[in-house]
């Protein structure tokens, strides 16, 4: 399997670079979870990092990625079907001037 050295920013892993396995598309996973064992024998703490673009890449080369710390965790995913309505819809009728 192919891996890429990916930097981590923020949180306890700030400044570290870890080899991350790439998927079949050549990209690392969108989220990276790191379980940290509790020294007192309690439940593990899970550090969550989100994949973001590292910066502007050179023309013709693939985009590189980095991971940023997400202290709030990962937001729940919602299926995005083409026929789904957006979350925020304005009130009133389309031809209504008052809104």
Image: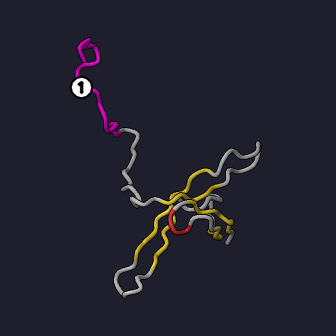
Residue 23: tell me if it is visible.
no
Q: Split into 4 quadrants, where in the image is the C terminus? A: top left
Is-magenta flag for residue 85? yes
User: Would residue 36 be found to the left or right of residue 3 on screen?
Assistant: left
In this view, 84 is above or below 25: above
Residue 59: name its quadrant: top right
Q: Position of residue 46 (x, y in %)?
A: 43, 72
The residue singled out by tag 1 in the image is: 91
Residue 68: tell me if it is visible.
yes
Count of labels shown?
1
Q: Position of residue 35 (x, y in %)?
A: 46, 76
Is-magenta flag for residue 97? yes
Q: Split into 4 quadrants, where in the image is the N terminus? A: bottom right
**Magenta region, residue range:** 84-99
User: Would residue 18 be found to the left or right of residue 49 on screen?
Assistant: right
Instruction: Compare residues 32 and 27 and report the one nearer the observer.
Output: 32
Q: Secondary structure at mark 1?
A: loop
Residue 23: name its quadrant: bottom right
Residue shown at the point (64%, 63%) measured from the top left:
6
Q: Position of residue 3 (x, y in %)?
A: 67, 68
Residue 90: name its quadrant: top left
In this view, 95 is above or below 19: above
Residue shown at the point (51%, 65%) measured from the top left:
32
Instruction: Compare residues 65 and 45 and report the one nearer the observer.
Output: 45
User: Would residue 2 be found to the left or right of residue 33 on screen?
Assistant: right
The 10 Å Cα crowd at callout 1, few under 14, some 14 to 19, many 20 or more, is few
């Amino acid at each position: 399997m192919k891996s890429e050295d990916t930097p981590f920013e923020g949180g306890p892993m700030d400044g570290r670079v870890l080899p991350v396995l790439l998927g079949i598309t050549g990209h690392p996973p969108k989220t990276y979870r790191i379980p940290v064992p509790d020294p007192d024998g309690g439940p593990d703490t899970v550090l969550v990092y989100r994949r973001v673009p590292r910066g502007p890449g050179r023309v013709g080369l693939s985009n590189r990625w980095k991971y940023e710390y997400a202290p709030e965790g990962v937001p729940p995913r919602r299926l995005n079907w083409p026929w789904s309505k957006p979350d925020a819809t304005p009130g009133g009728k389309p031809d209504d001037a008052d809104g």
